[in-house]
Amino acid sequence: MERMFDSVSAPTALERARAALQSVERRVGIEHRDQVVALAAPGPAPGPAPLTELLPGGDLPSGVAVTVQASASLMCWLLGATQRDRWVALVGWPELSPVALVEAGVDLERVVVVPDVGGRGAAVLAALLDGVEIVVAGPRVALTASERRRLLARARQRDVTLVSPSVWEGAALVLDVGQAQWSGPDRGDHWLRESRLSVVRHSRADGAGTHFEVARQGTTAPTALATRAAARRRAG
Amino acid sequence: MTDRSGPAPTGTATRTACLWVPDWPVVAALVVAGLGPETPAAVTGGPGGRIVAVSAPARSSGVRRGMRRREAQGRCPDLQLWAADDARDAREFEPVAVAAETVVSGLEIARPGLLLLPSGGGARYHGSEQDLARELTEQVAVRTGHECQVGVADGFLAAVLAAREDAVVPPGASPGYLAPRPAAVLVHARPGDRALTELVDLWRRLGIRTLAELAALPDAAVAARFGDLGVWGQRLASGQDVRPPARRRLEEDLTVAEELDPPAHRVDVATFAARRLAERLHEDLSRRGLACGRLRITARAVDPVTGEARTLERVWRTDDTLGGLSAARITDRVRWQLEGWLTASSLGQGEAPAPIAGLTLAAEEVAPAGALQPRLWGPGAGEDLRARRAVERVQALLGGDAVLTVRLQGGRDPRDRVQLVPFGEQVPPERDPDRPWPGALPPPAPSVVLPEPVPAHVLDDAGRPVVVDVRLGVSGDPARVVVPGEGAWSGLDAAVVDWAGPWPVAERWWTPQGKRRVFLQVVADGVEAPALGLLLSSSAGEWSLEALYD
């Protein structure tokens, strides 16, 4: 929706009227109209873009749960691309390599690690949500469904991003890595240098999901490329 | 200082008053024994149990330092003897320091029996240095009953020697006061130091008999020949201070305690007491204008069934001060800690939480408030306070060691390159990350590093294990990777698409803990992941899965 206003340089009277109509529609809850597609930008610019292209607003949304499934590498890269001055807590995920975090650009000075929550995952996460801006709840934190709901509510209240590598019911943004392809060794001549992840993004704006191709060469900044139209609509 | 009139010696020397209680170890022992100063007494210590301190009546009977116990008893049959006890000396000296503090604030205990204090301000306040000395002697005599002597001079050594003579050396006259004295008087600045005694003896044999002769030696020659101790002696002999005197007295820890009767079972009951304690501690600190670097919380838990008492203790760093610890923040911390203690899990498996019968708060590393300067930018700035408090909260839940900060250090594999440090602790890196570390794995690093390597099999086309020999010859191209067993990472059976290596890494081979490993990177075609990167290592013919690129 925001993209519409960015791309249209000098809105005509008709477009302005449509925009006004649309904002009214949005306020009253009507979401699906074909006009939106007509007005939207013609897909993202071709060519790879920074990794933050993967995120709807170019940044990790706060006050919600985000899941980055099936790739610890993508988790590292996303944290590196979006940490800036924020604190990150890694809870119950001792396998996540700090070396990979640093290579992704994470400032370890503002990372706290709680490798083992000792069965008190909910209490630990709740305490961290009070003060840390990005809380990663790793696979070793056992939570019941009701605890997840309460933690999500708390994250919403404190405007904190709750990140999980596995399914989190009610997550506002789901990045699901379908395929991870590592390459580069060339039968012993080189080493693992390149990675390509095909990522499906699910969020409220994505409908059935937007497909991206995330690529990284060596330790350069990873890039994201939308492989199908960004603003696909649900049928009907 | 400003009132110094004579030519200043090279370097600095502060106008210093020195308060000396003669024969302190004996005096302290007599106090503990409840005997008067007229008793002939001595303290023995050191190798062979020789006499190290003698009281005045015993000295008049001919007992001297360094005598054997039997010889001393022979000269003075009713001699009382005690073994040396540093703790006793220090403990009993505290009242003397307190008495001196009523006259001058900010003093330094050089050792039990010897106090140093700045004389400038005190002398101006009391009229003159003689008045200051008289006032000090009087207060110590009135408040503790001990006889003491006070000397005032420029610099440490001159002041110590002046105190032995109960003299005031005029400003600027200290070098002249020191010059004719034998070099052996240096021992008074550092009694009981065998190395110093030997050095002084060496100087005497070399012909350096007086402090003036010692001071006249070239600095570099002294440093080269006699080391640090020689430099120290020479600087003192020329009337300088070895270090700027630490006028900021290290304050004692402040402690507040309360018994809880009946013992508190619930957090809110204990917190109620904790709040009172916190307010008392905070009031104590602010009344004295102090801030503390650490807060020690001690609780005495009593088992309800057996009555067995147990002490729980936790130290909190309070270096994130913004305006210091308020009573509310102290209460918060104590409450979090009590929550941690009064809920079962932190007390051991399956144990019922024990009610808390006593609570003690101690402010440690006490320093004048305002000496702590929070950083303006970067981590540690004000905006991080919220995060730090959240982390403290988790530390209260799980214990201080459960929350870690991560740092990179030198090393070759991704596990070695990580140093985990409990949050808030300062630990130097074990290995310098800026060294080259030849043979380190090339970046990018694997994203998942298994906590422990998992045994694996690497097979070639014919299904034989791949073996890497001493000359790094590989018996066959890797074709399959199998991770047996039932662990979290096992069950993998994948065809090898591509591979890199083997890279040999021989670490610390010159020690018994040496490791020789060969690393192999593999792109495996798994069922769910078509091209997953694996890092394998081989040591003594056994392969193990180290890390994953996913």
Image: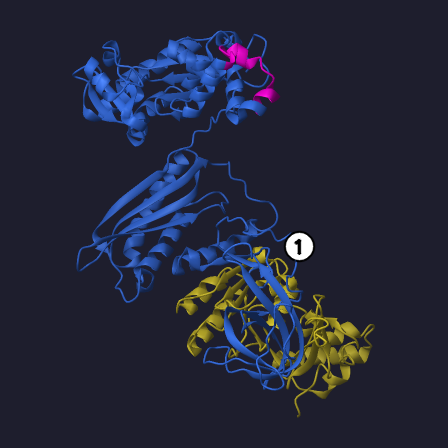
**Image position, residue B17 (x, y; %):** 43, 16
The magenta stretch spans residue B234: no
Quarter of the figure with residue B67: top left
In the image: residue A206, left or right of residue B482 = right
Residue furthest front in the image: B470
Q: Amino acid at mark 1?
A: Pro
Name the chain letter of the residue that bears numbered label 1. B
Quarter of the figure with residue B97: top left
Magenta region, main secondary structure:
helix
Residue furthest bottom in the image: A236
| Tag 1 residue | B436
**Image position, residue B234 (x, y; %):** 53, 18
Q: Colour of chain A?
A: yellow
Q: Is residue A203 visible?
A: no
Against B222, residue B402 (above or below) is: below
Against B421, residue B252 (above or below) is: above
In the image: residue A204, left or right of residue B130 = right
Q: Is residue B257 visible?
A: yes
Quarter of the figure with residue B148: top left
**Towards the viewer: B261 or A137:** A137
The magenta span reads B206-223
**Image position, residue A22 (x, y; %):** 70, 80
For the N terminus of chain B, the quadrant is top right
Could you tell me how many numbered marks the image carries? 1
**Image position, residue B320 (x, y; %):** 50, 47
**Towards the viewer: A170 or B30:** B30
Chain blue in the figure, letter: B
- The residue carrying pointer 1 sits among few (fewer than 14), some (14 to 19) or many (20 or more) residues within 10 Å by Cα, namely few
For the C terminus of chain B, the quadrant is bottom right
In the image: residue B174, left or right of residue A228 = left
